[in-house]
Amino acid sequence: MAFPQPSSRIVLTTIFVVAAAVGVVFGLLVSSQTLMNNGSIVKTIGVSVYWDSECTNPTTAIDWGPLSPGEARDCTVYVKNDGTAAEVLSMQTGNWTPPEVSGWLSMSWNCTDHVVPHETVVAAVLTLTVAPDASYTPSFEFDLTIIGTEVT
């Protein structure tokens, strides 16, 4: 006994319904969260921070843009030694808002313990990393302090 062939309209409708169902199931299995955020350089000690290597555009705040759990984002700034002698660079964060974000965000950079001669400029790559299991928050802020300590 021969079965009738389905019309092309029925076949296309079936393919569309199957594709839509796969898309819905896939969408349920994949979740992502975007974290709106900001960071600010509120203070520098013994150094100045700029957006450009010519030190004409001071950095006062960093907008990290939207981030997802597990993501890391780099930002390059230029640190100038304003002191009268060589300085060792360090960086610290604080005043996390809301406070719980400090548990799933981490800040690092490529200039820890870097010695910068007097009136020298170095490129510093700041990296903000979000933990893979980070909770969602619509926005956050924190203070970033870059410190130059005179070499003794």
Image (spheres, rainbow, N blue to C red):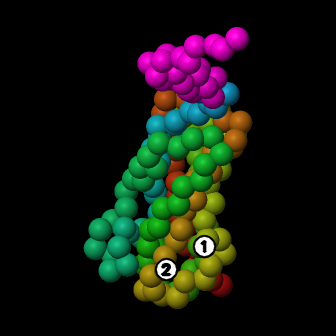
Figure label count: 2
Q: Is residue 5 above or below residue 58?
A: above
Label 2 sits on a secondary structure element that is: strand
Give, as a single range, the part of the protein colored magenta: 1-26
Q: Can residue 24 be seen in this view?
A: no
Q: Is residue 34 above or below residue 50?
A: above
**Residue located 29% across and 68% down the image:** 57
Q: Is residue 3 magenta?
A: yes
Contact, mark 2 vs mark 1 (Cβ under 8 Å): yes
Disc 1 marks which amino acid? Answer: Cys
Residue 95: name its quadrant: top right
Looking at the image, which is closer to me, 134 or 112? 134
The quadrant of the picture occupied by the N terminus is: top right
- The residue wearing badge 2 is 122
Q: Which of marks 2 and 1 is nearer the N terminus?
A: 1
Looking at the image, which is closer to me, 89 or 64? 64
Residue 48: name its quadrant: bottom left
Q: Where is residue 86 in the image (x, y as percent from the top left)?
A: 55, 86
Instruction: Please identify the dominant SS of the magenta region.
Output: helix
Q: What residue occupies the far front of the structure in this picture?
A: 1
Q: Where is residue 80 in the image (x, y as percent from the top left)?
A: 44, 77
Label 1 sits on a secondary structure element that is: loop
The quadrant of the picture occupied by the C terminus is: bottom right
- The residue wearing badge 1 is 111
